[in-house]
């Protein structure tokens, strides 16, 4: 075999374990789900193979599903916006820090050492009826009875921000770290104030990172089911909770399959729009 | 009137002194170079003038106005950075016109001035392009255009040529000087390259370890170095430790190893007051190798053996040994250089020497 042919084969040999795992555990199961979505759950409870459009008709026409999809997208959007507003200054601070950046980044990663579920549940001990905040309020005599703070859309968004903020900070940080500080000096020397330099130079150059962080926050936020399950009330279900409900509670796999494919399609379109304008390479930079 | 006056400015970072108190007066329209090796404080000094660093002490005035507490965006300075610092997301025209946005300039006026600046740097047709589409040399010109289009009180240049390759650097050097001369802007240039400093400056400020070693026109700094550091930093010099025997009749007699007594012109030994320890400064370019016994009249000479030959084309650098002293000589040649091991005579004119007080 020629050297060129061997070199051309080498990446494929190295990639083959990963490709095998992805094919077996991701692509084939997704294909199964596609097939499932056209099957039908009969009234007696068993699943009837075939080509039925009933699940898709229900998924795409039922106002109930549509409303929850819109709520899900709204919650994800609000969460992303809050993450951007809170994360940008933090990322700016780390990127421009004179001292130990590695330590600051380590502190940022620290929450990932604790399970996401436990981090989410920790809010119950802060906001619950017997939680830290209510105990403090009663102890100071500000309220007599505990205030109901948990189990609403606000706490869902709070939990999501808690979960997703580091992703935003990391992405913006990577972008800002690549912006040459001399550019701000140059803008200053030409007569721009610090704020004008930021708006004219630093902010536009860090937009790719902001967009990458925004995409990650939005996709992860829209796909979550743990946060609304733990911190949301009965009326705060998000779309992934519907999938959970259909598959685990109702054992209606065909309907669950159609619902999850709809969410996948909506988020997939968003990723494609992002890729068209900014390219997924930026996202990889933030993750790496 | 002075364009820039530094009065005892100094900069400390904690206990480390980056710039010891220095004073400097820069006349209107002058081209002044801060020259020194990295870490000598030249860039720190420039950044203090720019307003990017606060001096620990002293006073900076620009056109008679104290600027210590004036933020950078109010100082009306043009700065050309080493890495050009062009805004990558803006077109060339927007880059050059950036400073005009913050000045009271109408749109038409701004467009005209951007066009003129681009013509001045001989890149009239690149306005619509982005910086990444230009070569390093072109980006450098755009950075210059952006700095001068705002008609700054002072132009600050922080090693602007060091990122260019050798040939381009020499061309840009000539062109930069020409443009500066044409618009007459007071310029402060920072470099570690002695050739740039000598070629471009009206005045050179040689710095080392945060101290000013010497201030003067290029010829003076080159021909009459005020310290051993200056003698070695601008070109290569042989420093021979000897004794001053007398200072009289416009000459200073230095008794040096190898060559005996050398009468140095008094103006090139301003700091040697009279008899005592002294150092003879003999520039490598002024020490000439000739065939053995071929010393010319009026030269001081001695025999030597060629030890190393460093051939550079039009010039050659020799290391020769005379007695137990090694000397360096840089000679222009038009035929073959001497070979290693050749026995030669080294000669120089006493008036080409300088002297420093010695220990």
Image (tube, helix red, strand yellow):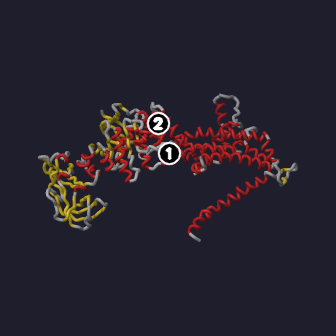
Q: Which residue is mark 1?
A: B130
Where residue B100 appears, as percent x and y from the top left, is 45, 35
All told, the count of numbered labels is 2
**Could you tell me which chain the residue with mark 2 belongs to?**
B
Q: Is the same chain shared between marks 1 and 2?
A: yes
Depth check, front residue: B201 or A63 = B201
Q: Quadrant of residue B6?
A: top left
Q: Residues within 10 Å of mark 1 (few under 14, many from 20)?
A: some
Question: Residue B74 sits in which quadrant?
Answer: top left
Q: Nearer the viewer, residue B173 or B311?
A: B173
User: Can the viewer see residue B116?
Assistant: yes
Q: Of discs 1 and 2, which sits in the foreground?
A: 2
* Rendered-image quadrant of the N terminus of chain A: bottom right
Q: Secondary structure at mark 1?
A: loop
Neighbour tally class for label 2: few under 14, some 14-19, many 20 plus, Cα within 10 Å: some
Q: Which residue is mark 2?
A: B111
Question: As drawn, is A222 to the left or to the right of B202?
Answer: right
Please give left or right for residue B48 compared with residue B273 in the image.
Answer: right
Residue drawn at x 62%, y 38% as measured from the top left: A82
Q: Is residue A177 above or below residue B346?
A: above
Chain letter behind tag 1: B
Q: Name the residue at 88% across, 50% down.
A: A44
Q: Residue at x 70, y 57 (%)?
A: A25
Q: Earlier in the sequence, mark 1 or mark 2?
A: 2
Is residue A98 visible to the viewer in this orientation of the structure? no
Q: Who's the residue at 65% across and 62% down the image?
A: A17
B204 or B99, nearer to the observer: B99
């Amino acid at each position: 075999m020629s050297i060129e042919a061997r070199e051309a084969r080498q990446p494929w040999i190295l990639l083959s374990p990963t490709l095998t795992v992805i094919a077996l555990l991701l692509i084939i199961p997704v294909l199964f789900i596609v097939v499932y979505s056209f099957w039908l759950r009969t009234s007696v409870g068993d699943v009837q193979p075939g080509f039925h459009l009933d699940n898709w008709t229900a998924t795409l026409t039922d106002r109930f599903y549509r409303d929850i999809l819109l709520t899900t997208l709204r919650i994800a959007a609000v969460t992303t916006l809050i993450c951007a507003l809170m994360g940008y200054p933090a990322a700016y601070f780390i990127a421009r820090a004179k001292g130990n950046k590695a330590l600051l980044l380590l502190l940022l990663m620290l929450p990932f050492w604790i399970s996401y579920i436990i981090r989410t549940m920790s809010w119950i001990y802060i906001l619950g009826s017997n939680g830290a905040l209510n105990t403090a309020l009663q102890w100071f005599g500000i309220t007599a009875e505990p205030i109901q703070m948990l189990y609403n859309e606000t706490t869902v968004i709070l939990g999501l921000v808690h979960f997703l903020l580091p992703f935003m900070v990391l992405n913006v940080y990577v972008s800002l770290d690549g912006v040459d500080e001399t550019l701000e000096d140059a803008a200053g020397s030409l007569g721009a104030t610090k704020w004008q330099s930021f708006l004219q130079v630093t902010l536009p150059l860090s937009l790719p990172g902001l967009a990458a962080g925004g995409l990650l926050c939005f996709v992860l936020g829209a796909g979550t089911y743990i946060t609304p399950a733990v911190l949301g009330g009965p009326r705060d279900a998000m779309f992934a909770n519907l999938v959970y409900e259909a598959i685990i509670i109702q054992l209606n796999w065909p309907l669950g399959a159609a619902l999850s494919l709809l969410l996948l399609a909506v988020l997939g379109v968003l990723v494609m729009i992002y890729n068209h304008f900014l390219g997924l390479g930026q996202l990889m930079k933030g993750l790496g | 009137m002075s364009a820039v006056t530094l009065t005892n400015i100094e900069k400390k970072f904690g206990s480390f002194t980056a710039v010891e108190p220095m004073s400097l007066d820069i006349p209107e329209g002058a081209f002044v170079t801060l020259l020194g090796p990295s870490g000598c404080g030249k860039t720190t000094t420039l950044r203090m003038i720019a307003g990017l660093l606060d001096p620990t002490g002293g006073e900076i005035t620009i056109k008679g106005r104290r600027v210590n507490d004036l933020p950078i965006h109010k100082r009306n300075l043009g700065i050309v950075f080493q890495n050009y610092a062009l805004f990558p997301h803006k077109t060339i025209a927007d880059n050059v016109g950036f400073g005009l946005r913050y000045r009271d300039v109408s749109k038409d006026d701004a467009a005209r001035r951007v066009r003129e600046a681009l013509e001045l740097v001989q890149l009239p047709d690149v306005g619509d392009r982005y910086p990444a589409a230009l070569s390093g040399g072109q980006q450098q010109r755009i950075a210059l255009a952006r700095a001068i289009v705002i008609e700054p009180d002072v132009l600050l240049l922080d090693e602007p040529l060091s990122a260019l390759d050798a040939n381009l650097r020499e061309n840009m050097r000539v062109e930069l000087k020409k443009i500066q001369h044409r618009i007459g802007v007071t310029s402060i240039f920072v470099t570690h390259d002695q050739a740039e400093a000598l070629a471009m400056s009206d005045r050179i400020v040689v710095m080392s370890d945060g101290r000013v070693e010497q201030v003067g026109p290029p010829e003076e700094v080159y021909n009459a170095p005020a310290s051993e550091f200056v003698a070695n930093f601008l070109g290569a010099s042989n420093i021979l430790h000897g004794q001053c025997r007398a200072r009289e009749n416009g000459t200073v007699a230095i008794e040096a190893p190898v060559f005996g007594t050398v009468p140095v012109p008094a103006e090139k030994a301003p700091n040697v007051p009279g008899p005592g320890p002294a150092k003879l400064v003999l520039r490598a370019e002024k020490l000439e190798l000739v065939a053995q016994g071929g010393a010319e009249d009026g030269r001081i000479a001695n025999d030597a053996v060629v030890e190393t030959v460093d051939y550079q084309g039009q010039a050659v650098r020799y290391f020769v040994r005379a007695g137990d002293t090694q000397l360096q000589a840089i000679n222009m040649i038009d035929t073959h250089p001497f070979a290693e091991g050749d026995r030669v005579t080294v000669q120089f004119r006493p008036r080409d020497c300088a002297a420093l007080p010695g220990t």
